[in-house]
Image (cartoon, helix red, strand yellow):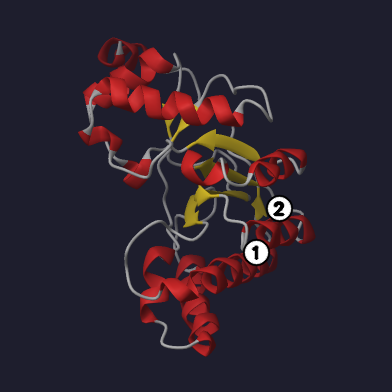
Amino acid sequence: MRSLPDRGTVAITVDDAPMPDTMPAMLDLLERFGAKATFFMSGCRAVLAPELVAQTVRRGHAVYAHGWDHVRLDRESPRRLTDDMERCETLLARYRPTPSPYLVRLPYNGGWRSARVHRTLARWRPGCAVVHWGPSTEDHMISTRCAAVADVEPECRREVERLMADPRLPGGIVLMHDQPINDRPGAEFKPAVTITLLRLLLEALAARGLKSVVLPPPAPPVWWRRMVLT
């Protein structure tokens, strides 16, 4: 899945959630703007903030597993991949029914071109689909350019302006993170970047007349893809 059929909509997808110092503000911002989002949650974070998982579901957002540990699962064994995804989904299933068909985004989008990974995922959840993105907020790099809190807003605004000029935005799947899991410099600015970026993005989408919606279920695979992935 790479885009939406309705060019009057966008899908904000948020990886690595939920973090207790940013997720409540993110949910409030989405509600303020009448927007919905799709969260790919990391089990190692979700297990520490179960109420935030429950609150995300209550507010009408979509929630899927992003694995348990934020590692390159495409470089692990098929057993490790499915165990990691199943462990996370078992946690999330306490708060909403397991979606079917299932949407998948592995950490780092690893393995999206790997037939082995697709076959493994298809055995784990038949009919599942890997979710790609078009426009990216590049938020994993924003904090590295900040030397002080005052830098956060202009750096985030620059990225949002770039996104608004991207021709893929209408009908696009937008990538952002709830404090991206990485070891890059500027970690102290990640919470402010996450909240500020989402606020500016929602403001810009509203001004553009684009509605943020949850990702729809994947379309049934065409016959040749079923042959490849089974």
| Residue at the spot of label 1 | 202
Q: Quarter-wise, where is residue 124 in the image?
A: top left
In the figure, is residue 178 to the left or right of 114? right
Q: Residue at x 69, y 44 (%)?
A: 56
Report the quarter where the C terminus lies: top left
The percent coordinates of residue 91 (x first, y second) are 57, 30
The percent coordinates of residue 131 (x first, y second) are 43, 37
- In front here: 111 or 113? 111
Q: Quarter-wise, where is residue 38 in the image?
A: top right
Q: Is the residue marked by circle 2 packed among few (<14), some (14-19), or many (20+) residues within 10 Å?
A: many
Report the quarter where the N terminus lies: top left
Can residue 73 be seen here?
yes
- As drawn, 159 above or below 174: below
| Residue at the spot of label 2 | 35
Q: Is the residue marked by circle 1 packed among few (<14), some (14-19), or many (20+) residues within 10 Å?
A: many
- In front here: 5 or 160? 160
How many marks on residues?
2
In the figure, is residue 117 to the left or right of 5? left
> Are discs 2 and 1 less than 8 Å apart at CB?
yes
